[in-house]
Image (cartoon, rainbow, N blue to C red):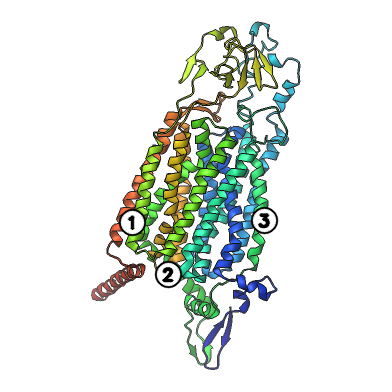
Amino acid sequence: MTEKTEKNGHISHEIDDQEYQCGFYCRIPYLQRFATAAGFTGFFILPQLASQSLSSYINSQIPTLERQFSLSSYESGIIMTFNDIGFLLVGILVAAIPKLVHIPRWLFGAIMIFAVSGLLCSLPHFIVNSKQDVTDTTLEIANTTKLAESSIFPICTDVVNSDNNNRTMENKPRFLNLAIDQSLKSLSVGLIGIGLGLQGAAKSIRTPFLTQYLDEGNKDKTGFYLGILTSAAIFGPVLAYVLGGIFSRIYVTLEDVDMSTKDPRWIGAWWLGFFVFGFIALIFSFPLLCFPRYLTQKNKRKEKEEENLVMKHEIQNGLIVGSLKEASKMEIFKERSASYIRVLKSPVYLFLLAAFVLHISSVLGPVAFKTKYIVAQFGLPLWKANLIISAVTVATVAIGAFFGGYITKKFKLSPRMFIVVILILHAGQIVFGGGVIFVGCDQPQIVGPNMPHSIPINMTDDCHCDPKDYFPVCGSDDRNFHSPCYAGCKEVVRNGRMYANCTSIPDGQASAGLCPFECNTLIPYLLLNVLGYASGSLKIMPMFLATIRSVEDRDKSTAAGLKSVAASLLAFIPAPIVFGKIIDTSCILWNSDSSRKGSCSLYNIADLRISMFGTVLIYKAAALIFMLLALWKVWAIQDWEELRKKKTDHMKMNGDAEKAASTEHK
C-alpha cells in the first residue's frame, strides 16, 4: 500500500496493482484468470492434501512406533500432542493477523515447514539403525549352527544340557524385550516430537488464513469452497492410511526378510511415509507464491483497508497530527483487543465452541488409536487395518464434509435451523457410537502360564518356560500358545517363522503370531462407523459456519482463530493422552523388564471396547447439552444479521448504562 497527500491536504491510500494480480515478479495476463476464490481453491487442494496427509500419517503407524521404540499408549498420546502444542503456541500469535499479511506467501511458508518436519520425523530410523539394529542379534544367531539352542527364541530347552545354562534371567537376551536403550528412545521421541511440533505450527496458519482469504473473495460461496478444502484435508488421511498400509508391509530396513507381517518381531517401514509426504508437500507448495495478496476487487479492497487502518488524520497548519504508521499500529492493536472481547461476549459462540471442543475430543481420541484398536479387537495385521480405515471411515468423512458444505451453500438456513440440523446429526452419532460398544470379538484363548484369559498348561516343567517371554505362536491345531516353549517346541525353522517338534501339538508344527480370529462382527462394526462418521462429517461445515456467523463480520478471523486455539488446548492436546491412558488400563501383558514398562503385548479386548467407547459417549452427551443451550439462545432469531444486531445493541446498552452510572457517580 502506498500513501499520497492530495492538494486538499487529505491522505489517500493506493493499493498496488500487483497486490491483486497473479504472478511472481512477472504478472502474465494469462494467469489473471486464476485470481479468484475458485482458482485459489483449485490450486490449494494439492498442498492441503499433502500437508494433511503428513499430519495424519503418524496415526497409521502407532502400533509400529510403539513396538519399535517400546512405547505405551499413554506415551504415544503424549507424542501426538506435540503437533497441537506447536499449533497452540503459534495459533495464539497468528489468529488475529490474516488481514495484515500476504496470506498466500504465509501459506507457502507453512507448507515448506511441513516438508522439513517430514524429514525430522523420519530421522530416528537412521539413528536407531546406525547405532543399534534391532534385528542384528537375531540375524547373527540365525546364522549359527545352534539356533535351536539359542535363548533368543523362547523354545523348550533342557537347561541342564543347554549351552546357555549359565545365563540368568537378568542377562538372557529376549528379542521382544525393549528394543532400544533409554537414551536412543529419548532422542528418537524428541526428534519425532519436534517434527510434529513444526507441523502444528504450520497447521495453525491454515484455518484462520483460509477463512479470511476466501471469505473476502466470494462471501456467498465461502462455505462451498471451504467444504472442498475440508474434503481435501480429510482425504489427506485417506492417502496417509493407504500408503501407511503399504509401508506397513515393507520391513523397516527395506530388506527382504523371511518373516510374515503377523510375526511378533515384524516392524514396518514407518519412516518412509514421512519422507514421501514431505517431498510431495515441498513440490506442491510453489504455485502458492503466484497468488495475489487480495482476491477482492481493487475498489472494495481499498475501502476495507482504509476502514481497518482507521485513516482519520487531521491536517493543521500543513502538518499531519501524529504519524500515520504509529496511529495505524495503535488502532490495529485496539481493534484486535476489542475483537477478542466482542467474540467472547457472544453466548451463542461460546456454547457452540464448548460443543465443538467436546465433540472433537470424542472423535480425536478413537481416531488417534483406531489402527491399534482394529488390530487388537479383530486380530487384523496393521497393513489391513490401515486400508480398511482409508477405504471406509476416512472416505466417508470426506464425502460427508463435502455435502455438508454443499448444504450450507444450497439452503439459506436460519440460525435456528442451522443448530437443529446440527442436533439431529449429533443425535445420530450418539446412537451409532453407542452401538459400537456391543460389537466386538471374544478374547483369544492362549495356552500358557496362569494369567488372565489364558489356558494353564502343566507340561512346561521340563521346558523351563519363562512367563515373561511372550512370543505367541499358532499351532497347526489352531490353538494359540504363549510362546514356542509352552507349545513344547524344540526346533526353530526359517529364522523363527516356523517351529517344529512341538510336543503339545498333534503334528508338532507351529508358526509365529496368533491364529486368525474367528469373529464375524467386523462388518457390523464398520457399518456403524460409516453411519456415525457420515452423521458427524455432515455437520462439520454447518457447525463451523454457525460458529463464525454468530459473531460480527469483522470478527470472523478472530472467532475462527480462537476456535482453533481452544480446540487445540482443550481437545487435541488432552484427548490422545486421556484415551491412551484408558487403553493402557486394558493391557494384561506388558513387554517390559525389571526397571521400566514398554509396549503392551496383549489386551483385554472387551475392557478395551467398553472403556474407549463409553468415554466417547460421555463426551458426546456433554456436547449435546451445549448444543441445546445454543438452540435456546437462537430460537426466536430469523437470520444471522438479526443475531449480530441484537448482540451489538445489548453491548451498546451496557456501555451506555456504564457511562450513565459513571456520570451519576461524579
Q: Amino acid at mark 3?
A: Leu
**How many numbered marks, from 0 up?**
3
In the image, residue 193 above or below residue 292: above
Q: Position of residue 111 (x, y in %)?
A: 62, 57
Q: Earlier in the sequence, mark 2 or mark 1?
A: 1
Residue 624 as seen in the image, left or right of residue 245: left
Spatial CA distance of label 3 from label 2 is 34 Å
Q: Does label 3 or label 1 sit earlier along the sequence?
A: 3
Mark 1 residue element: helix
* Residue at which label 1 appears: 420
Image height check: is 287 above or below 514? below
Label 2: state its secondary structure: helix
Residue 223 makes an appearance in the image: yes
Residue topped by disc 2: 553
Residue denoted by label 3: 282
Disc number for residue 439: none
**Residue 623: image location, x then y, percent:** 36, 49
Give the crowd class for mark 2: few <14, some 14-19, many >=20 residues within 10 Å: some
Q: Secondary structure at mark 3?
A: helix
The three-letter code of the residue at mark 2 reads: Asp
Q: Determine whether 36 is above or below 541 in the image.
A: below
- Where is residue 281? Give x, y as percent: 64, 54
Of residues 653 and 451, the one nearer the viewer is 451
Q: Residues within 10 Å of mark 3 (few under 14, many from 20)?
A: many
Q: How far apart, in angstroms, are the residues tagged by discs 2 and 1?
A: 23 Å
Report the front residue among 569 and 404.
404
Q: Looking at numbered disc 1 in the image, what kind of residue is underneath it?
A: Val
- Closer to the chain start, of discs 3 and 2, is 3
Q: Residue furthest left?
A: 664
Position of the N terminus by quadrant? bottom right
